[in-house]
Image (cartoon, grey):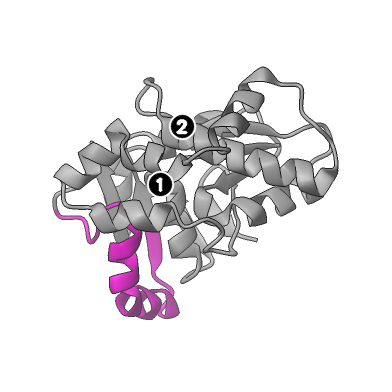
Amino acid sequence: MAIVIDVLRASTTINTLLQLCNEVYITDSIEKANSYKDAIKIGERNGKKIEKFDFGNSPTEILRNKGKILEHVKNNGKVVLTTTNGTRVMKRVFKNANYVLIGSITNAKYVAEKAVELAKSGITLVPCHRKGTFAIEDVIGAGLIARYIEEISKEKTKNEEVLAAKLLTKGDWKSLILNSNSADNLRNLGYHEDLLFCICENAQDVVGMFDGEKVIRM
């Protein structure tokens, strides 16, 4: 059992989409995304919306256009997402986990509940980070989810990385995220609203599971 965490913004965007549709197709390739017929294409590279795609990797942009997405899905259209980092990590983790859930700050309690329900031999938290470099927002997301897992399961972790993540959540973790390198990049690209949305703890009661091709609402 693994929970993949990409707070800014793939996990949060996926959760937002799953509030509108039952499944989101995932790819780490722009070419593969373009190969889907009759699909709304959502994605970014280095935070910027991909040229000729319908939307960027932005939960607030998704919400502003939810009518179009709902109508598309109602007519059996697909939704496909590709991002710089999060979708790639999801595919890598899937190779070694029997379940892969999508975690964020916005669904922390709910993904923890589902993980405890499904897990049989431990839960691995996988912060996506930024193309191999440390991303504090994903570690904080992992820490929040870990706290909920412990509350629900009544079991304390001894994993030192998880303990460190939990420590980050005891202070003003929102300020840590809002002052992070990832946040600076998003602000420079005009996505300040996304930053505020992505730090709303437990605002989304949806949980998605990745099956290797798509994330399915559970």
Q: Quadrant of the C terminus?
A: bottom right
Q: Quadrant of the N terminus?
A: top right
**Residue 74 falls in which quadrant of the image?**
bottom left
Mark identifier at residue 205: none
Determine the CA span between mark 1 and mark 2. 10 Å
Q: Secondary structure at mark 1?
A: helix
**Residue 77 falls in which quadrant of the image?**
bottom left
Mark 2 and mark 1 in contact (Cβ < 8 Å)? Answer: yes
Q: Vertically, is 70 above or below 86?
A: below
Report the magenta residues as a range. Answer: 52-79
Q: Is residue 74 magenta?
A: yes
* Amino acid found under the numbered disc labelled 1: Ala
Kindly tell me whether residue 132 is visible in this rendering.
Answer: yes
Compare residues 156 and 71 and report the one nearer the observer: 156
The image position of residue 44, as x and y in percent, is: 25, 45
Between disc 1 and disc 2, whose residue precedes? 1
Residue corresponding to mark 2:
128
Q: Vertically, is 19 above or below 46?
A: below
Residue corresponding to mark 1:
10
Please give left or right for residue 204 compared with residue 161 in the image: left
